[in-house]
Amino acid sequence: MKRLLYISTLPKNSQSGGANAVNFHTFKALNNYFDCHYKQINPPEPKLGKRLSQIKRKLLKVPAAFNYFSKERLIQIASEFNSIVGNYDVVFFRDFAPWVMCEPKVPYVAYNDVHFLQFFKNTFSSKEFSQGDIQRICNQEKVWLSQAKALAFESSWGAKQCAKDYQIKNSDLVSVGRGGHIPIPERDTYAGSLNLVIIANNFYQKGGDLVFEAFKSLKSYYPKLELHIVGGHPGRAVEKFHGVRYHGYIYKEVPVDLKKLTDILSQAFLLMHVTREDTNPLVITEAGYYGCPSISVDKFAIPELVLHKKTGIIIPCPVQIDDIIESVANLINSREDYKKMRKATIEYNQLNFTWESIGKQLKHLISH
């Protein structure tokens, strides 16, 4: 059995949040095929550089260095990597950009949602940061990726964006998908509620404000409609509105919390995910395991996760509140079509987004 060194910035057993859950299950899946050894490398961001960057961006309103991937921190990461003792046949990196100065003596494979430039475009304004510094990181990442034995992505969209930005051949970038981090139910137990569900650490970032405005309009026509919010606080005005149920943060590692989340999803009418910033949202897959269709947007990897009018509804960006209202109302008024959508949602997600399948694909990439 090949000895595999697994490198990540995240704690080995952390399962909260999408990134941690994917990391946890990736290591667990690889353990079925390799003699795996886990190493977390995540030195703190240089304090002086972080403070200077904040002053420039927030106070002086001028471009700053991207301090999290500063030369200083990348050198420290590489130094910690070089200090690892042991003989390994392959190195597996979760993520890309942190490792660009690491030079393994054996073949290496990397698996991520998106490359650094796509993450940057999704998250930041280009005016905030020095273009020269961003280009430095991108150039290093491109070289490092081109030298890998294999590159795996969580979506075809992520792979295509990397190929486009870094001029890497599509054939060298493989989409293996990712699974959810929640028990897969044996059957659909939905009992007919009209519960809309938002799961988001940042209510605004994930379009919660837009969904709430739509909900207020819909509530007068459909009195049984409820809006269930999991995660970050939506604001007092939202929380106190009639029909809103705020559940706070739910931690899947806690059995009582996990039961609460599965109860919410099993009785959800729709997952509402009209996000402004994303890559490959895990919540769509996890809701889909329970037969809950999603209303989401035509951006990022989401069209791979939601099949329009089959496992949910895709609406165009920028999102219009009227489009949300129309999508929800149509499904409320077409219950036979909705029943078919639930069935298709379960089949699509339970067939295509499991860690068993992903583990087999990663094993193939590493072994060939």
Image: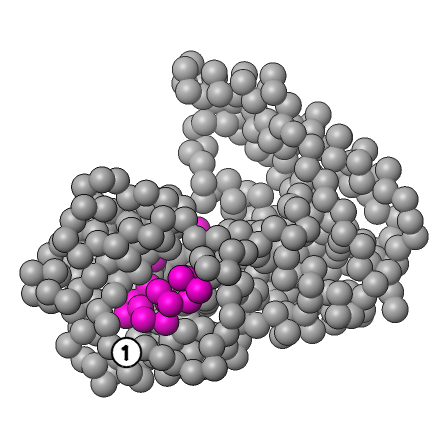
Residue lying at 60% horizontally and 16% vertically, measured from the top left: 48
Disc 1 element: loop
Q: Left or right of 73: which side holds 161?
A: left
Whether residue 29 appears in this view of the structure is: yes
Q: Nearer the viewer, residue 177 or 349?
A: 349
Q: Nearer the viewer, residue 195 or 58?
A: 195
Residue range highlighted in magenta: 259-278
- 166 inside magenta stretch: no
Name, please, the residue furthest toward the front. Answer: 256
Whether residue 365 appears in this view of the structure is: no
Name, please, the residue furthest toward the right. Answer: 87
Q: How is the image coloured?
A: one colour
Label 1 CA crowd tier, 10 Å (few <14, some 14–19, many 20+): few
Q: Left or right of 179: which side holds 91?
A: right
Residue lying at 52% horizontally and 44% vertically, measured from the top left: 119
* The quarter of the displayed image where residue 160 is located: bottom right
Residue 214 lies, in percent from the top left, at 17, 55
- 265 inside magenta stretch: yes
Residue lying at 53% horizontally and 25% vertically, measured from the top left: 130
Residue lying at 85% horizontally and 39% vertically, measured from the top left: 82
Residue 181 position (above or below residue 50): below
Name, please, the residue furthest toward the top. Answer: 60
Residue 319 lies, in percent from the top left, at 26, 53
Q: Nearer the viewer, residue 61 or 306?
A: 306
Which quadrant would the N terminus be assigned to in this image?
Answer: bottom right
Identify which amino acid the numbered label 1 is placed on. Answer: Ala
Residue 95 lies, in percent from the top left, at 64, 49
Residue 176 position (above or below residue 201): below
Q: How many marks?
A: 1
Residue identified by numbered label 1? 191
* The quarter of the displayed image where residue 320 is located: bottom left
